[in-house]
């Protein structure tokens, strides 16, 4: 199925990324199956350039996940499912494909969840299973949006970190989903967008999505969040997650931890939006979460230019772990849960 919806061609409800392409104004998913291959929005090129890439084999999918052409935990999960489908279609060794895909990025639980789900369906049609997986992610995100939108009021000032929008979740978003629903319900609110060094997912991707949706926002330097929180100018924080442990400790983009501590210190409610695929109930706490270390060049270079002295080195953890005690609630497709009170989710998992 091609997830490409043209305005004026019988599709009326906008889904996620309203973008201008050569074909006109379109709504696209972040990734979809397109005949024999998979098509994905190249997230490395946004917002300057909108382009898609074709992915024909599972090693190409593994590369697209590693180099962050596709990124964000639920989109990584869908990409992994599609990668397994490509391997199945080509008659490849599925256990080998699973190994290669699982070795791409260690932190996002959705990747492992999706690959294991596809392995459990190996006797059936994996293309259909992957399509169903991606559709399921979108349905969950829409429910997250419905549950989370009740937290946003007219006049709210919301802060978010990284990109947990449609690009990161196949469609609609997790942290951005409540904002989409609130906006479409006519609520007027404002979003602080952390720029999110070093890869700038906030300044590049979240800003692009909010602009496309028509939501009022401003990009702030990462270290400006405390300034606004301490002055009472932030009403709530909503972020996504890459992996959530049984006790509610969770990993998300580097810098999330300090935003959560600042929010607690300033009395600002702090919410985490994520589908069940992001919960890792095999972990008792966040100390077991593997944190991806990425290339130091992501810190040393900005826009392809080195900004630091030759000879200086950099360290680049891509995620950090926020303790459950900093979290006001987890917005899921099944409602809003208090940290650690996940028994209903465990049953679903
Ligand atoms: O390294 P990235 O860009 O894949 O990290 C993304 C994040 O940290 C997101 O906040 C997280 O995956 C949640 S996406 C709904």
Image (cartoon, rainbow, N blue to C red):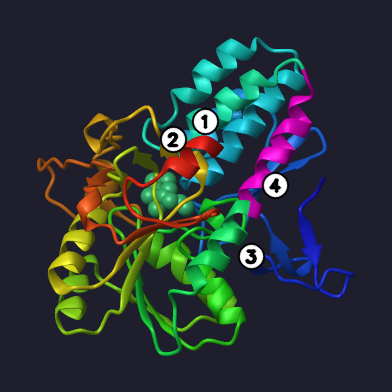
Determine whether label 2 and label 4 are within 8 Å by CB.
no
Left or right position of 228 against 318: left
The answer for how far apart the CA atoms under marks 4 and 3 are is 14 Å
Residue pointed to by mark 1: 113
Q: Considering only order in the chain, which callout, 3 or 4, is on the residue closer to the N terminus?
A: 3
Residue pointed to by mark 2: 109
Which region is colored magenta? 124-139
Q: Considering only order in the chain, which callout, 4 or 1, is on the residue closer to the N terminus?
A: 1
Q: Considering only order in the chain, which callout, 3 or 2, is on the residue closer to the N terminus?
A: 3
The numbered disc on residue 336 is none
Q: Nearer the viewer, residue 153 or 25?
A: 153
Q: State yes or no: residue 135 in magenta.
A: yes
Main SS, magenta residues? helix
The answer for how far apart the CA atoms under marks 2 and 3 are is 23 Å
Determine whether label 2 and label 3 are within 8 Å by CB.
no
The numbered disc on residue 135 is 4
Residue 348 is drawn in which quadrant? top right
Q: Nearer the viewer, residue 97 or 151?
A: 151
């Amino acid at each position: 199925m091609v997830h490409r919806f043209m305005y004026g061609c019988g599709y009326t409800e906008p889904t996620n990324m309203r973008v201008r392409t050569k074909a006109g104004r379109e709504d696209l998913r972040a990734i979809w199956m397109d005949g024999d291959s998979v098509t994905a929005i190249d997230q490395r090129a946004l917002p300057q350039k909108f382009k898609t890439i074709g992915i024909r084999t599972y090693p190409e999918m593994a590369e697209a996940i590693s180099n962050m052409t596709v990124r964000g935990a639920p989109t990584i999960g869908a990409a992994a499912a599609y990668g397994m489908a490509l391997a199945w279609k080509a008659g490849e060794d599925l256990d080998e494909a699973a190994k290669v895909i699982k070795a791409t990025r260690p932190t996002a639980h959705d990747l492992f969840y999706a690959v294991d789900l596809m392995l459990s369906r190996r006797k059936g049609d994996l293309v259909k299973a992957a399509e169903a997986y991606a559709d399921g992610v979108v349905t969950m995100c829409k429910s997250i949006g419905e549950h989370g939108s009740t937290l946003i009021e007219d006049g709210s000032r919301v802060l978010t970190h990284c990109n947990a929008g449609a690009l990161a979740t196949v469609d609609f978003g997790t942290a951005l989903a409540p904002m989409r629903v609130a906006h479409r319900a006519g609520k007027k609110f404002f979003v602080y967008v952390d720029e999110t060094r070093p890869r700038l997912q906030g300044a590049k991707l979240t800003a692009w999505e909010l602009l496309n949706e028509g939501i009022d926002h401003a990009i702030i330097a990462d270290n400006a969040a405390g300034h606004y929180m301490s002055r009472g100018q932030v009403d709530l924080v909503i972020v996504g997650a890459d992996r959530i442990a049984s006790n509610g400790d969770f990993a998300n983009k580097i810098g999330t931890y300090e935003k959560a501590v600042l929010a607690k210190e300033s009395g600002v409610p702090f919410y985490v939006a994520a589908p069940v695929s992001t919960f890792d109930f095999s972990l008792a706490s966040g100390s077991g979460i593997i944190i991806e270390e990425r290339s130091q060049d992501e810190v040393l270079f900005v826009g392809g230019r080195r900004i630091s002295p030759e000879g200086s080195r950099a360290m680049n953890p891509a995620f950090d772990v926020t303790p459950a005690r900093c979290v006001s609630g987890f917005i899921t497709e099944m409602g809003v849960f208090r940290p650690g009170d996940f028994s209903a989710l465990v049953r679903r998992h």
